Image (tube, rainbow, N blue to C red):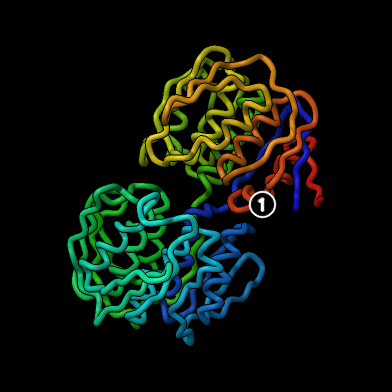
Amino acid sequence: MDKLYIDGPAKLNGSVRVSRAKNAYLPIIAGVLLNPRKTTLINLPELRDIITINKLLSNLGVEIKTEGHKTIYDTSKFEGHEATYDLVKTMRASILVLGPLLARFKKAKVSLPGGCAIGARPIDIHLENLKKMGAKIELESGYVYATTEGLKGAKCVLPFPSVGATENLMMAAVGAEGTTIIENAALEPEIEDLGNFLIKMGAQIEGLNSSTITIKGRPLSELNEIEHEAIGDRIEALTYMMAALITDSEIEITGFVPSHLDAVIETLKKMNAQLEVTSDGIKVLHSKLEGITVETAPYPGFPTDGQAQLMALCTKVLGTSVITEKIFENRFMHVPELIRLGAKIELKGNTAIITGVEKLEQAPIMCTDLRASAALILAALASEGKTEIQRVYHLDRGYEKIDNKLRSLGVSISRINE
């Protein structure tokens, strides 16, 4: 099992380009299933989650081949409709094949996502609205069994702006008869990117980048052969921004749309961060930071996927910071590990109170989930001595070659299989 070792405190310098967004490409790869013609995706990041969903499609019978920076999907002959537990258990995004499979084959058998009893991080929003579109759904032995005589357009009002439900319903609606309206749709940039991908394919979609999305269905046989490259990864970008700030370094991060991080940029500027927005990214300058009070919220609010990284940053900001997690329960699993490095953090329900310290010190620490892993990387960069980080396979789900990228910025970091 791989471990990372980071010598701190580090100083970063230079420029880093973020990869294409995992959270954009996962639904897009699921959307490939709609198209009976070839689809080419450009610059897929080398990540565990991308490998997993590609394996899922291969198991369904999709032919996938790679030519340089291009990955070509041929769905003309596949007939599979079952996403098995052995793959879905490792990645919640696998549920996104449900809508496309129903639209394409009028049936689907998809394992419930790993760690997801309907209740915590539920998929009931997906299922209830697919029922409105004419799907018959049964839950049995940990699987969703869905059939339809043909999906019909419907009005789908989401009780919460769920990203996954918005994506699943958008894809199902492309192959439905009539018009589907999704109200209280998620606003994340990855939703807009999925919509643009589907429009290239031939879908008729209005209202992208708004809370009401309208999709007029059409026969899938009329869709086009296309190429598409996803947007840059805004979560990777904010992680490098905070890596520079926690080490008081100056770097440039490129390859993403800065406006996708407006809430993060605003929060960091309130902390007195010195940032320069460019056309293709952002420059981080030397900054003397102050404490902050912030709550996570659906986009365009402060992203829950940046909460752990912000907390790591706040451990080195003198004064008190208060972070409240409003999206997911159990998203403070990084706190005990940060405390092992010398951080002062007090938890009160879904709120963390962080008192900044002058010095963090190395200790063996363990990754517990993807974004928690990023937080531990940041803290290790600012710690005195060599920090050992275990279970970095979590990190490899969402950060492409992060050790190589940090090394290019001047960090002494090594990956060892032990």
Which residue appears at 28% of the width and 47% of the height? 160
- Amino acid at pointer 1: Tyr
Mark 1 crowd level (few <14, some 14–19, many ≥20, 10 Å Cα):
some
Residue 163's place in the image compared with 128, above or below, is above
Which residue occupies the extreme top position in the image? 319
Which residue appears at 73% of the width and 27% of the height? 11
In depth, the one of 417 and 174 nearer the eye is 417
Residue 46 coordinates in the image, percent (x, y): 64, 58
Residue 161 lies left or right of residue 113; in this view the side is left
Residue at the spot of label 1:
393
Question: Which image quadrant for residue 283?
Answer: top right
Residue 53 coordinates in the image, percent (x, y): 54, 66
Which residue appears at 55% of the width and 37% of the height? 333
Residue 98 coordinates in the image, percent (x, y): 38, 69
In depth, the one of 274 and 243 nearer the eye is 243
Residue 410 coordinates in the image, percent (x, y): 77, 34
In depth, the one of 401 and 203 nearer the eye is 401
Residue 232's place in the image compared with 381, above or below, is below
Which residue appears at 52% of the width and 52% of the height? 21
Which residue occupies the extreme front position in the image? 141
Residue 163 lies left or right of residue 59; in this view the side is left
Residue 235's place in the image compared with 118, above or below, is above
Residue 288's place in the image compared with 232, above or below, is above
Question: Which image quadrant for residue 364?
Answer: top right
